[in-house]
Image (spheres, rainbow, N blue to C red):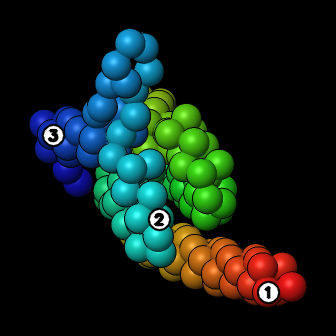
């Protein structure tokens, strides 16, 4: 079992990662902030994968800290929603900038750790790994659908421009 100091240190690191991904950059002239996640998501193909992997790190750490299966499932659901919508060009990036799944996930973890006594927490690494595998499968499927849709649009454009 981790000491309270070790838990506090891990939470501090997770907050930093979440802040970097979701809120590190102030938009000039506004009170709104975005993070690296929506910016990285602009990179075709690999951007959303990188965002998913960084978000998955938070889920794995939550499992190590003793987050329940229900909390881990909700955290994974936040990432799935962000990833699936993120595959839609431009709209997905705007959604990514506003949804802030990592901030939501840190909040879920902190709420859980405040409510559940340390003696009742279990490390759910195997469950978290299954969730992450599911996330990767969902991401691969959404990437495939995005690719097929893009290819179809390009074919339609080629036919339209050719006539």
Q: Earlier in the sequence, mark 3 or mark 1?
A: 3
Q: Is residue 83 visible?
A: yes
| Mark 2 or 1, closer to the camera | 1
85 with respect to 25 (left or right): right
From the image, which quarter does the N terminus lie in? bottom left
Query: Which callout, 3 or 2, points to the residue nearer the camera?
Result: 2
Query: Distance between the Cα atoms at labels 2 and 1?
Result: 33 Å
Residue highlighted by disc 2 = 48
Indicate the quadrant containing the C terminus: top left, top right, bottom left or bottom right. bottom right
Q: How many marks?
A: 3
- Among the two numbered marks 3 and 2 on one chain, the one whose residue lies closer to the N terminus: 3
Q: Secondary structure at mark 1?
A: helix
Residue 34 locus on image (x, y percent):
40, 34
* Labels 3, 1: front one: 1
Q: Residue at x 55, y 35 (%)?
A: 98
The reply to whether callout 2 and callout 1 are in contact (CB within 8 Å) is: no
Q: CA distance from mark 3 to mark 2?
A: 28 Å
Instruction: State how far apart marks 3 and 1 are (Cα).
Output: 61 Å
Pointer 3 residue: 9
The answer to whether residue 78 shows anywhere in this view is: no
In-front residue for pair 160/27: 160
Question: Which residue shows up at 57% across the image and 42% down it?
Answer: 94
- x and y, in percent, of residue 75 in the image: 54, 51
Residue that mark 1 sits on:
162
Left or right side of 38 for 23: left
Query: Where on the picture, by quarter, is residue 77?
Result: bottom right
Classify mark 2: helix, strand or loop: helix
Label 3: element kind: helix
Quadrant in which residue 85 is drawn? bottom right
């Amino acid at each position: 079992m981790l000491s309270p100091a070790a838990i506090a240190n891990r939470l501090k690191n997770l907050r930093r990662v979440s802040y970097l991904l979701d809120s590190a950059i102030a938009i000039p002239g506004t009170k709104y902030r975005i993070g690296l996640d929506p910016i990285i998501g602009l990179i075709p193909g690999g951007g959303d994968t990188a965002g998913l992997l960084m978000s998955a790190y938070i889920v794995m750490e939550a499992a190590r800290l003793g987050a329940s299966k229900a909390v881990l499932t909700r955290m994974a659901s936040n990432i799935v929603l962000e990833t699936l919508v993120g595959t839609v060009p431009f709209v997905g990036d705007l959604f990514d900038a506003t949804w802030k799944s990592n901030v939501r996930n840190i909040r879920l973890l902190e709420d859980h750790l405040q409510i559940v006594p340390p003696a009742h927490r279990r490390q759910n690494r195997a469950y978290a790994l299954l969730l992450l595998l599911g996330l990767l499968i969902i991401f691969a499927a959404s990437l495939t659908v995005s690719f097929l849709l893009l290819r179809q649009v390009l074919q339609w454009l080629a036919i339209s421009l050719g006539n």
